[in-house]
Image: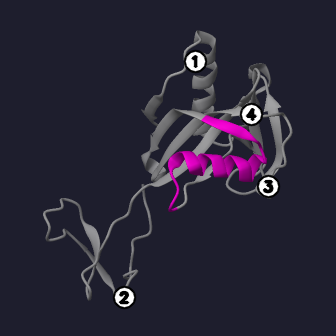
């Protein structure tokens, strides 16, 4: 993954230098040349749900880039001060305007090329009425046969849906953890 390097300290605005910290760390880090703060760059967490109503799954048509106009599970970046489950619930309310009960963790996907970890929870919808927020053009239920597979926004969504339908067919849901290159 390639990111723009940190150039200035987030605390004092002095320039940083990339070097090994003096604490035994084995990776070069951006270290402030004035206050010596070590700036760590960590992956972002994307959290969401697989909302289910009967034999259908709720998908949202994106109204924002990237991949505006493509279908996705309700998900987004986790905020500070919330758990992964709370973030998944917030994103589902914001994007789909859905009422639901969050259930078990379902997929955990490391996506190192973009510096992200995606976590999806199963969710049981309370009803089939939705009030999508501004990030969503449309929120709609799909049976497995109706899923717009070629119009899905992200590979993580495709993989999660494939695991969901396979687990549903087997009658046993489990946690799926894997990497996406």
Which residue in the protein does label 4 denote? 125
Label 1 CA crowd tier, 10 Å (few <14, some 14–19, many 20+): some
Q: Which residue is mark 3?
A: 133
- Distance between mark 2 and mark 4 Cα atoms: 47 Å
Numbered disc in front, either 2 or 4: 4
Number of numbered discs visible in the structure rendering? 4
Give the magenta range: 80-102
Mark 2 Cα-neighbour bin, 10 Å: few <14, some 14–19, many ≥20? few
Nearer the N terminus, badge 2 or badge 1? 2
Q: Which residue is mark 1?
A: 167
> Magenta segment: does it hold 157?
no
Q: Quadrant of residue 145?
A: top right
Depth check, front residue: 78 or 180: 78
Quarter residue 165 falls in: top right
Identify which residue is drawn at 44% across, 69% down.
Answer: 4
Q: Is residue 138 left or right of residue 20?
A: right
Camera-side mark, 3 or 2 = 3
């Amino acid at each position: 993954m390639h990111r723009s390097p940190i150039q200035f300290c987030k605390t004092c605005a002095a320039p940083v230098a990339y070097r090994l910290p003096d604490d035994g760390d084995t990776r070069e880090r951006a270290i402030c040349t004035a206050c010596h703060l070590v700036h760590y760059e960590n992956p972002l967490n994307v959290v969401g749900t697989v909302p289910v109503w009967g034999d259908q799954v709720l998908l949202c048509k994106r109204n924002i880039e990237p991949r505006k106009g493509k279908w996705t599970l309700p998900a987004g970046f986790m905020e500070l001060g919330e758990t992964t489950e709370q973030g998944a619930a917030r994103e589902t309310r914001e994007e789909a305007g859905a009422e639901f009960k969050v259930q078990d963790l379902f997929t955990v996907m490391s996506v190192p090329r973009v510096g992200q970890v995606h976590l999806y929870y199963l969710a049981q919808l309370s009803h089939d009425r939705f009030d999508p927020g501004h990030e969503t053009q449309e929120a709609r239920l799909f049976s497995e046969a109706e899923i717009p597979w070629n119009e899905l926004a992200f590979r993580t969504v495709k993989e999660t849906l494939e695991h969901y339908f396979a687990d549903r067919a087997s009658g046993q849901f489990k946690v799926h953890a894997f990497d996406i290159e």
